[in-house]
């Protein structure tokens, strides 16, 4: 099959196995070039196939030589349809981990369900005994509640009042104004149910009940704060409310885990191009402006650099983990530097369709967006015939 990108809005419906594989290998190579992390031994990553979850799994395996189990919701190729990018990423990860002599397993299915939790716990018990790090990195538009069957959908909306700001169609470069009406009470409730902490806590409780956690187990979930420009739609909006719920869950889990020497944290990460962030209005334009400023300042990072720094400079250091006044780990520190934010604000004021390529790194944004699906990757021949059917070894 000749595999080319096919986009529909902010998603790409095709993925390229070789391109995805090459991107994963580049992340592995980056980690292998860094000093080893004296970190976790047996790691469960929920939401492990793309973005921050995939990078966390790579740092665990190739930075700390940990055995890993990845849980994710991806699809194999079928007929004329390619597999999803996360499928190809995970196939490449599993192959590389096996070559390195590391144990690694994949579970594909709905992490919100009891079935997948039970299956994962059984696998931990038979293959790893216990896990000492649980990374929770699920980003999803919907969740079926495992006990009630209620289907929740998340929305990205402001609370209380209408929000208008600049946004970009990153395919065409057209800068327009996006106006988003405030969420209803029910939309807020549903967003918290999808992206808040309930499912994370269900995972930890189930692991604990099954005696599948080490006494000193660490768990971490990810959040975003960002600048004033995006606050109404992110930090102070429905998703921010869900992230507050996630922080409250971190505090509850921390207290529980502390009883045996364990710990639970939220890490606030940098804004990056991922399948999830490209779906948020305003954010892709902010990311494009941010990328230009941070690349010029020499402080730009991708998922893998962020996760390597989270493990090596925060989670697995001697002594106390540095946290802010909300007990959150901040690896968005470089993004939030005042001089970076001032430069982005200045760009923001002047931004229009006519100058978007000059003032921002929209080109870089688009390149990374297609890169998420294995396209625009150097050294891949996109005219060549490629087999879309790729097996994931150790798929349970
Ligand atoms: P992503 O879309 O790249 O990854 C999401 C992962 O969740 C994938 O592996 C997907 O398979 C998995 N997933 C989705 N639904 C699932 C389900 N029902 N069952 C099992 N797996 C499921 O997203 P990302 O941007 O890496 O986001 C991960 C976390 O990082 C989120 O909490 C997000 O809010 C946070 N974060 C993202 C950014 C950013 O800019 N991208 C910044 C800071 C924090």
Image: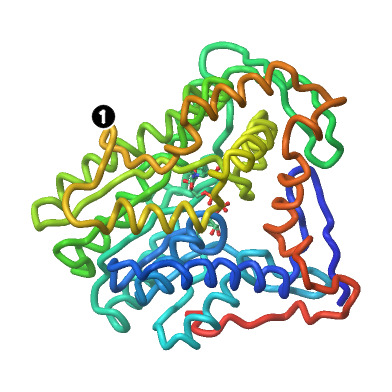
Q: Is residue 395 above or below residue 297?
A: below
Residue at the spot 40% in from the left edge and 70% down from the top edge: 63
Classed neighbour count for the residue bearing mark 1: other residues with Cα under 10 Å, few (<14), some (14–19), many (≥20):
few
Residue at the spot 48% in from the left edge and 74% down from the top edge: 106
Task: Decide which of 235, 351 is in the foreground and name it.
Answer: 351
Task: Decide which of 120, 134 is in the foreground and name it.
Answer: 134
- Left or right: residue 192 versus residue 344 is left
Residue 263 visible (yes or no): yes
The x, y position of residue 281, in whole percent, is 67, 31
**Which residue carries the number 1 mark?**
325
The x, y position of residue 190, in whole percent, is 49, 34
Outermost residue, left side: 259
Q: Split into 4 quadrants, where in the image is the N terminus?
A: bottom right
Asked which colour scheme the image uses, the reply is rainbow
Callout 1 secondary element? loop
Outermost residue, front side: 297
Residue 115 visible (yes or no): no
Residue at the spot 76% in from the left edge and 54% down from the top edge: 12
Q: Is residue 316 above or below residue 162?
A: below
- Left or right: residue 109 versus residue 133 is right
């Amino acid at each position: 099959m000749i595999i080319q990108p096919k986009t529909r809005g902010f998603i790409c419906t095709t993925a390229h196995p070789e391109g995805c594989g090459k991107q994963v290998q580049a992340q592995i190579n980056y980690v292998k070039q860094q000093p080893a992390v004296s970190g976790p031994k047996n790691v469960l990553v929920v939401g492990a196939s793309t973005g921050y979850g995939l990078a966390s799994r790579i740092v665990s395996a190739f930075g700390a030589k940990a055995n890993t189990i990845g849980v994710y919701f991806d699809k194999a190729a079928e007929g004329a349809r390619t597999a999803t990018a996360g499928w190809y990423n995970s196939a490449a990860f599993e192959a590389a981990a096996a070559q390195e002599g590391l144990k690694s397993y994949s579970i594909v299915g709905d992490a919100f369900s009891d079935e997948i939790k039970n299956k994962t716990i059984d696998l931990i018990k038979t293959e790893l005994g216990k896990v000492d790090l649980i990374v929770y990195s699920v980003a999803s538009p919907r969740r079926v509640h495992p006990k009630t069957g209620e289907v929740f959908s998340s929305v990205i909306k402001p609370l209380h009042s209408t929000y208008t700001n600049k946004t970009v169609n990153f395919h065409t470069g057209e800068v327009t104004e996006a106006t988003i009406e405030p969420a209803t009470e029910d939309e807020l409730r549903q967003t918290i149910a999808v992206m808040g902490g309930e499912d994370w806590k269900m995972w930890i409780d189930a692991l604990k009940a099954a005696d599948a956690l080490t006494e000193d187990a660490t768990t971490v979930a990810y959040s975003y704060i960002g600048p004033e420009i995006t606050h109404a739609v992110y930090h102070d909006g429905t998703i921010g409310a869900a992230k507050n719920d996630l922080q409250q869950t971190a505090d509850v889990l921390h207290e529980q885990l502390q009883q045996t020497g364990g710990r639970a944290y939220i890490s606030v990460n940098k804004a990056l191009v991922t399948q999830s962030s490209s779906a948020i209005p305003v954010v892709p334009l902010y990311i494009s402006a941010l990328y230009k400023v941070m690349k010029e300042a020499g402080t730009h990072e991708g998922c893998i650099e962020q996760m390597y720094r989270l493990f090596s400079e925060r989670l697995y250091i001697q002594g106390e983990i540095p946290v802010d006044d909300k007990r959150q780990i901040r690896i968005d520190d470089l993004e939030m530097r005042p001089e970076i934010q001032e430069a982005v604000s200045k760009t923001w004021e002047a931004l229009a369709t006519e100058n978007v390529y000059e003032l921002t790194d929209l080109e870089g944004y688009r390149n990374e967006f297609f890169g998420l699906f294995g396209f625009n990757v150097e050294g891949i021949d996109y005219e060549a015939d490629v087999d879309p059917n790729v097996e994931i070894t150790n798929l349970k």
